[in-house]
Amino acid sequence: MKIAVIGASGFIGENIVNEALSKGHEVVGIFRRNSIPAQNNLTLKKLTIFDEADFEAAIKDCDVIVSAYNPGYYHVAQAERFLDGYKVIFNMAKKLNKHVIAVIGATTLIQYDGELVKDSLVFPKPWIKALEGTDRVFETYKGDTSLKVTFVSPAAEVFDGPLTKQYVYGKDHLIYDSLERSRISVKDLAHAIILECEHPKFVNSRFTIAYQN
Ligand SMILES: NC(=O)c1ccc[n+]([C@@H]2O[C@H](COP(=O)([O-])OP(=O)(O)OC[C@H]3O[C@@H](n4cnc5c(N)ncnc54)[C@H](OP(=O)(O)O)[C@@H]3O)[C@@H](O)[C@H]2O)c1
């Protein structure tokens, strides 16, 4: 497949690029400022998604778009910038009829007692504020049936760790392990995202992954 990755130079995006390349896919890696090393089958595009002509040209031949876009957790107008960015991404996806896999936060997941993660004590308050943007993107677009989108809410903690493939899937509920932690390595997260590119199972819905043991 040919996979576009928005945010290819980011923490999550770079791991998605590497996972896709390791499975023999072609990748178009989109970043704004900080490049990543060149590799076979990787076309790097330094652009801002807000330059819509450049963005369209970069993704028009791709089979699927993965977004690990993040304007910066501490951008002065973070929530608005997330919404502005996803407006561009989703409108382009509609125009080109592409499936988008969008990595958002865990704050809109639900606890086992029905409480939203953002209303519980899982994250410190500044983190909840920093994740407000993806929450608003999810609330705005989750019911938009004119769009082909899979939202991905990782576990509460995404850490730089190995590929294990030992994770479990959920839809809207936060998953805990036996030590009451909610965790996923960024490589396992990338693995699940590329599987969703290859064999979409959550179109117009959302999944989460985490370790159970
Ligand atoms: N980090 C975590 O632990 C975590 C956990 C759960 C969910 N998430 C979610 O996952 C997503 C990605 O997070 P991250 O931590 O990987 O972010 P990140 O490391 O800050 O990376 C963001 C990426 O977006 C790119 N970007 C920003 N503005 C752009 C623009 N206008 N046009 C093109 N590219 C642009 C950046 O490019 P440059 O670097 O070149 O500027 C960078 O590649 C976010 O929605 C975040 O909420 C993150």
Image (cartoon, grey):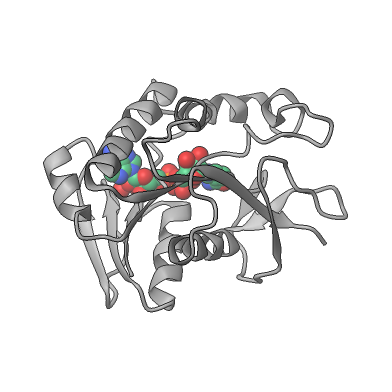
The residue positioned 63% from the left and 49% from the top of the image is 208
Residue 203 vertical position relative to residue 189 in the rendered view, above or below? above
* Residue lying farthest to the front in this orientation: 145
Q: Nearer the viewer, residue 115 or 149?
A: 149
Residue 196 or residue 203, whichever sits in front: 203
- Quadrant in which residue 49 is drawn: top left
Q: Position of residue 90 (x, y in %)?
A: 33, 37
Quadrant assignment for ligand 1: top left
Name the residue rendered at 87%, 55% in the picture. 178
Residue 47 point in image, percent of width and height? 20, 47
Quadrant of the rendering where the C terminus is positioned:
bottom right
22 vs 174, left or right, is left
Residue 125, how many percent across, how many down? 66, 24
Query: Of residues 77 and 59, which is closer to you in this image?
Result: 59
Q: Residue furthest right?
A: 178
Left or right of 85 in this view: 110: right
Q: Is residue 98 left or right of residue 67?
A: left
The residue located at (84%, 31%) in the rendering is: 113
Q: Residue at x 33, y 70 (%)?
A: 1
Tally the numbered discs. 0
Q: Against 151, is 71 above or below?
A: above
Q: Position of residue 150 (x, y in %)?
A: 48, 47
Tell me if residue 65 comes above or below residue 122 in the rendering: below
